Image (cartoon, helix red, strand yellow):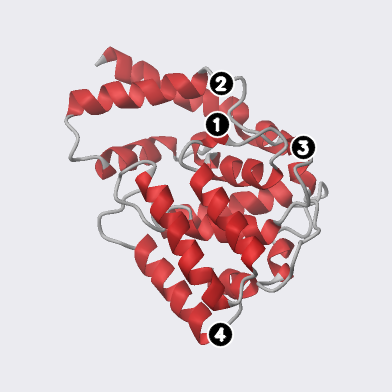
Amino acid sequence: MIDDWTALAGDSPASRATRAELLARWSEPHRRYHTTAHLSAVLAAVDRLTAPEDGTGAGGAAAEGAGAEGAGAEGAGAEGAGERGAFDPVAVRLAAWFHDAVYEGRPGWDEERSAQLAQSRLPRCGVPAARVAEVARLVRLTAAHDRAEPGDRDAAVLCDADLAVLAGPGYDAYAAAVREEYAHVPDEAFRRGRAEVLRRLLNTPSLYRTRRGRELWEERARANLAAELAVLERR
């Protein structure tokens, strides 16, 4: 992960300090799911979504670097998301680093503060203003993945990567960790709220916005969500 950050934001003293701050935030003791393991998983999912169809070259997007304007890599896995503009894999990966950097279990507020953190720290690392703005925009979109507009390729990749966990073999552990992060919420209130979230997700035409995301994860994710919902509804 250190190499990934350096490729994105350089190795200046400001960049190293920002990396250390982010890793410290992702390692806060109150976190159970939104940890460095989640950050690493999201970055790996971005690689899967943007790798060439033959499976080679995953992660090469990071080499565009902090000062590279208008990264031109199209990303084979992102083509299903449309044509909002040139896909910027560096912005997507930086947004992954920041998207849960502030996490206090306050949906919306957490993402806004995380976006503000990106706007404060990235200019010090030499990241161009346009890319900083894109990173902050993407971080804010993760508060409600359904707010991304059709054709928004950067958002499609980031949101799909963030939701890849829904299809994972460790889904039960993920759900348990989410419950631990909301330990302050009474059981019945959590059950109702969680069930509502699961129903909303299951009622969407597709959980994933990219073609590759749908191919990789859609079927398994829906099965996992439905299984958790069935358990909650029996309680």
Q: Is residue 228 visible?
A: no
Tell me the SS state at disc 3. Answer: loop
Tell me the SS state at disc 2. Answer: loop
Residue at 67% across, 48% down? 154
Tell me the SS state at disc 1. Answer: helix
- Distance from disc 4 to disc 3, alpha carbons, whole Å, reads 35 Å
Residue at 67% across, 54% down? 47
Residue 207, image x, y percentages: 58, 29
Q: Which disc number belongs to residue 146?
A: 1
Residue 129, image x, y percentages: 62, 66
> What residue sits right under mark 4 in the picture?
12
Nearest to N terminus: mark 2 or mark 4? 4
Q: Give 126 or 59, whichever is nearer the viewer.
A: 126
Q: Give 2 or 95, whichever is nearer the viewer.
A: 95
> What residue sits right under mark 2 in the picture?
204
- Please state which amino acid type lies under the numbered disc 4: Ser
- Distance from disc 2 to disc 3, alpha carbons, whole Å, reads 19 Å
Nearest to N terminus: mark 2 or mark 3? 3
Residue 232, image x, y percentages: 31, 20
> What residue sits right under mark 3 in the picture?
82
Nearest to N terminus: mark 1 or mark 3? 3
Nearest to N terminus: mark 1 or mark 2? 1
Q: Are marks 2 and 3 in contact (CB under 8 Å)?
A: no
Q: Are marks 2 and 4 in contact (CB under 8 Å)?
A: no
- Distance from disc 1 to disc 2, alpha carbons, whole Å, reads 9 Å
- Please state which amino acid type lies under the numbered disc 2: Thr
Of the two numbered discs 1 and 2 in the rendering, the one whose residue sits closer to the viewer: 1
- Distance from disc 1 to disc 3, alpha carbons, whole Å, reads 15 Å
In the figure, is residue 217 to the left or right of 84? left
Circle count: 4
- Please state which amino acid type lies under the numbered disc 1: Asp
